[in-house]
Image (cartoon, rainbow, N blue to C red):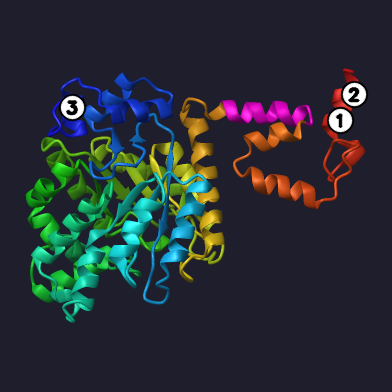
């Protein structure tokens, strides 16, 4: 098996890599099935060749819906130790991937430390690197970063072992024009998207990641990293959902997906954002149609704009609908969204909320092993088997703690909601 071939090229040649074997085993599917989906582009295996201690992560059609946790510093909080603790907590809570979005402090050291901290799949947005380096090292405005600076940031992240990179290739001058002509309340809420729009405006030039897309492909290919085509025009409020700018960008991302596949490079496509409940399924169908079935990675979607402090819940509602309709990868939202950098506790809550959404959708999608967990929980509850219930619980530590804190009388075997009048207890005694 040639080391020069990418996962997609090997799959197209009928070969099954060790990464595909490992990922298929984790998914309880055959390696042949996963290989075929990688070959057609409807699934990816995320693993940078330089990320030697990473578990290969399969994302896509017919697979368990995955959950990503965003972590990373800002200029207001530059603590490496806090972000490493968030990484540990996110993975312990069941996150499949981590994205390092650091923009404050020693971001190179932070990224490398996060990559070393766990075996989880790691993503990043290399444009942040170019922007931060321009401001902190060159002492110049962000808009003065050069095209070479942008690509140097990509190389730096890939060289460190990042498994998938978000690149806002669909943020073009024509897309900006469509946004401006139609009008938006929130305009561009994607940080990388806003950097790109401002850079294009200041330099009176096209987005380098779109104009020089072939250069991007040449850089990515030796690492066999996954391109995550970013949604720079994702709606930042319900009123902006499914407008011209969003859909025009999606059309461009579909075209770029095909070009990446032609080069043997795996692709995910990113999606909204803030979307009304009744538009979510249509958004998924549009992406799958326009992007040829490529895996879809969504932020939320958030189904209302007025729940700050509870946006992990608005995210879980939208995420369930999106994943049940075919989205493959959910990016969590924490209770801190729109308010502050998340705490360790916020990270745990965000991961759990998105895991609930993902699992609920997997039951609908018939993912192997999903409904079986719920059936096992039902049997444990019927028997008042508390250890069995904890074993099936998504967050067994919290379930155990809540029961212990209730001061339950173990003689009854039930919880303090019903005690001796527990319906399970009554029905079990009927058959005794």
- Kindly indicate whether the residue at mark 3 contacts the one at mark 2 (C-beta within 8 angstroms): no
Query: Label 3 neighbourhood size at 10 Å, few (<14), some (14-19), many (20+)?
Result: many
User: Splitting the image into 4 quarters, where does residue 196 fall?
Assistant: bottom left
Query: Label 2 neighbourhood size at 10 Å, few (<14), some (14-19), many (20+)?
Result: few
Query: Label 1 neighbourhood size at 10 Å, few (<14), some (14-19), many (20+)?
Result: some
User: Splitting the image into 4 quarters, where does residue 207 fall?
Assistant: bottom left
Name the image quarter holding the N terminus. Answer: top left
Say above or below: 55 vs 300. Answer: above
The disc label shown at residue 10, or none: 3
Q: Is residue 222 visible?
A: yes
Q: Nearer the viewer, mark 2 or mark 3?
A: 3
Q: Is residue 291 left or right of residue 58?
A: left
Boundaries of the magenta span: 372-384
What residue is at 35 percent from the left and 46 percent from the top? 297
In the image, residue 5 lies in the stretch drawn in magenta = no
- Kindly indicate whether the residue at mark 1 contacts the one at mark 2 (C-beta within 8 angstroms): yes
Q: Is residue 189 left or right of residue 388?
A: left
| Residue bearing mark 2 | 429
* x then y, percent, for residue 211: 8, 56
| Residue bearing mark 1 | 425
The answer for how far apart the CA atoms under marks 2 and 3 are is: 59 Å
The answer for how far apart the CA atoms under marks 1 and 3 are is: 56 Å
Q: Circle 1 sits in a helix, a strand or a loop, which is it?
A: helix
29 and 317: which is toward the camera: 29
Q: Circle 2 sits in a helix, a strand or a loop, which is it?
A: helix
Q: Is residue 190 visible?
A: no
The answer for how far apart the CA atoms under marks 2 and 1 are is: 6 Å
């Amino acid at each position: 098996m040639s080391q020069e071939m990418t996962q997609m090229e090997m799959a197209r040649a009928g070969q099954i890599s060790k990464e595909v074997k490992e990922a298929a085993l984790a998914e309880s599917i055959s390696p042949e099935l996963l290989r075929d989906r990688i070959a057609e582009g409807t699934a990816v295996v995320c693993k940078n060749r330089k990320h030697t201690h990473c578990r290969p992560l399969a994302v896509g059609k017919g697979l368990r819906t995955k959950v990503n946790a965003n972590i990373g510093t800002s200029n207001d909080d530059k603590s490496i130790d806090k972000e490493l603790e968030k990484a540990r907590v996110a993975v312990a809570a069941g996150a499949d991937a981590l994205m390092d979005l650091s923009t404050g402090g020693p971001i190179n050291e932070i990224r490398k430390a996060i990559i070393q901290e766990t075996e989880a799949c790691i993503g990043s947005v290399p444009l942040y690197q170019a922007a931060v380096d321009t401001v902190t090292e060159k002492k110049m405005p962000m808009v003065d970063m050069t095209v070479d600076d942008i690509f140097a940031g990509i190389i730096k992240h890939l060289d460190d072992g990042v498994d998938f990179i978000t690149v806002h290739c669909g943020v073009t001058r024509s897309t900006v024009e469509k946004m401006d002509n139609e009008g938006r309340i929130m305009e561009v809420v994607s940080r990388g998207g806003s950097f790109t729009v401002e850079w294009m405006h200041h330099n009176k030039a096209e987005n380098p990641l779109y104009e020089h897309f072939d250069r991007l492909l040449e850089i990515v290919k030796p690492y066999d990293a996954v391109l995550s085509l970013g949604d720079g025009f994702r709606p930042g409020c319900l009123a902006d959902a499914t407008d011209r700018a969003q859909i025009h960008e999606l059309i461009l991302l579909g075209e770029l997906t095909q070009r990446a596949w032609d080069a043997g490079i795996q692709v995910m496509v990113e999606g909204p954002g803030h979307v009304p409940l009744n538009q979510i399924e249509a958004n998924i169908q549009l992406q799958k149609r326009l992007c040829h079935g490529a895996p879809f990675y969504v932020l939320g979607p958030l189904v209302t704009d007025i729940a700050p402090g509870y946006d992990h819940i608005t995210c879980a509602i939208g995420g369930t609908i999106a994943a049940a309709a075919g989205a493959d990868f959910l990016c969590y939202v924490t209770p801190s969204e729109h308010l502050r950098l998340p705490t360790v506790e916020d990270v745990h809550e965000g991961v759990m909320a998105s895991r609930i959404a993902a699992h609920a959708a997997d039951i609908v999608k018939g993912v192997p092993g999903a409904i079986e967990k719920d059936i096992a929980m039902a049997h444990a509850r019927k028997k008042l088997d508390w250890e069995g219930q904890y074993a099936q619980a998504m967050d067994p530590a919290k379930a155990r703690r809540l029961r212990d804190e209730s001061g339950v009388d173990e003689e009854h075997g039930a919880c303090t909601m019903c005690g001796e009048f527990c319906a399970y207890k009554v029905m079990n005694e009927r058959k005794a």
